[in-house]
Amino acid sequence: MVLGRGTRLVAGAMGVACMVLVGPSAPSGVLFAGSLPVEAVRDVVPNRVMTWNICNPCGASDVDRAAEIARFAPQVIGLQEACVGDVEWIRDYLENLHGLVYHVEYGTVLQDWGRCGGAPWSPGAFGQAVLAAAPMTDVVNVEYPDGGSEDRGYMAVTTMVGGQPVRVFNTHLAQRRQEEVRADQTGVLAADVARHDRAIVIGDFNAVPDAPELAGMWALAADADPECHSSPTGTCEPTTDWQSKFDYIFLRGIVPLERRVHPTPYSDHHLLHSDLEPA
């Protein structure tokens, strides 16, 4: 049975209520109610963008993921390793439990039954997603000609950030030890980014800042952290549990104000967000 969004909201609320009363039933054993933020519901923070590889499969619940996002309430967030079904629930929980309303667009590049559930004849879609407080237009979904060991791609949308339209890209490059594949992927992505004077490029690049395959991006944009650059002498805060910086917010024609990295128990990648100077 396919549930409509309104039905899923009610079901989600009832499910959380049951978790409060009877405790966890998910395999991870995480008590959903204990994961809800204690602060009052806030509005979306203007000019804040975020990227997060939510790590699938990592066993985290969508309630926990939504609560992590709600802690920082970005205007725009790009997710990687995201199943369409999970993103739908995350969006519903953000609205129903936290009062944060987002539009969503998908950049899925893989049909993965094992990761995303569904049935063999209708596997779940897996890849990237963008959630934005403002509507999104001109949606583009590109699969890289060579994804490496797994299909990979990028998506792009136009949305409002700080009262001005901006092109937002969200990508996930090939896995580690595939440098030549990532270099080709960065070339495809950079060619599209170069067409825009104002752009935000977020995602999991699976490469440290001074990796040669990222040269094409550094030539076009700067990291949201002014201390982080492509030189080995740059000071770049790690964004993964293995103490490497793989996650980026690249800015083209946009000035950052503040950037933060937040480790989370629900993924092997940290949440990374940046507040941007209003246009």
Image (cartoon, rainbow, N blue to C red):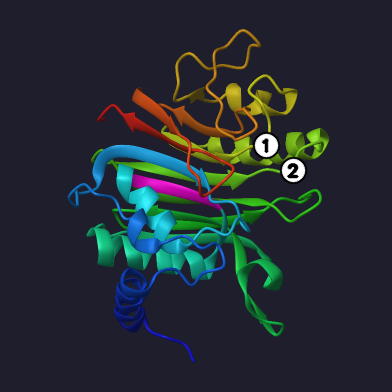
Q: Secondary structure at mark 1?
A: loop
Residue 78 is one of the magenta-drawn residues:
yes
From the top left corner, tell me how far across and down residue 95 is, in percent.
27, 63
Indicate whether 208 appears above or below 30: above
Indicate whether 157 appears above or below 19: above
Q: Residues within 10 Å of mark 1 (few under 14, many from 20)?
A: many
Instruction: Tell me where the magenta segment starts and ends, as one range.
Output: 74-80
Q: Tell me whether the residue at label 2 lies in contact with that at label 1, contact meaning CB atoms closer than 8 angstroms.
A: yes
At x 45% / y 54%, what residue is drawn?
130
At x 79% / y 40%, what residue is drawn?
181
- Residue 192: image quadrant is top right
Left/right of residue 60 with respect to residue 74 in the rendered view:
right
Q: Amino acid at mark 1?
A: Asn
From the top left corner, tell me how far across and down residue 255 is, in percent.
36, 23
From the top left corner, tell me how far across and down residue 125 is, in percent.
61, 69
At x 48% / y 72%, what residue is drawn?
25
* Secondary structure character of the magenta stretch overall: strand
Indicate whether 268 appears above or below 180: below
- Residue 175: image quadrant is top right
To which residue does mark 1 refer?
206
Q: Nearer the viewer, residue 114 or 124?
A: 114
To which residue does mark 2 refer?
175
Where's the C terminus, which quadrant?
A: top left
Please tell me the numbered disc located at residue 252. none
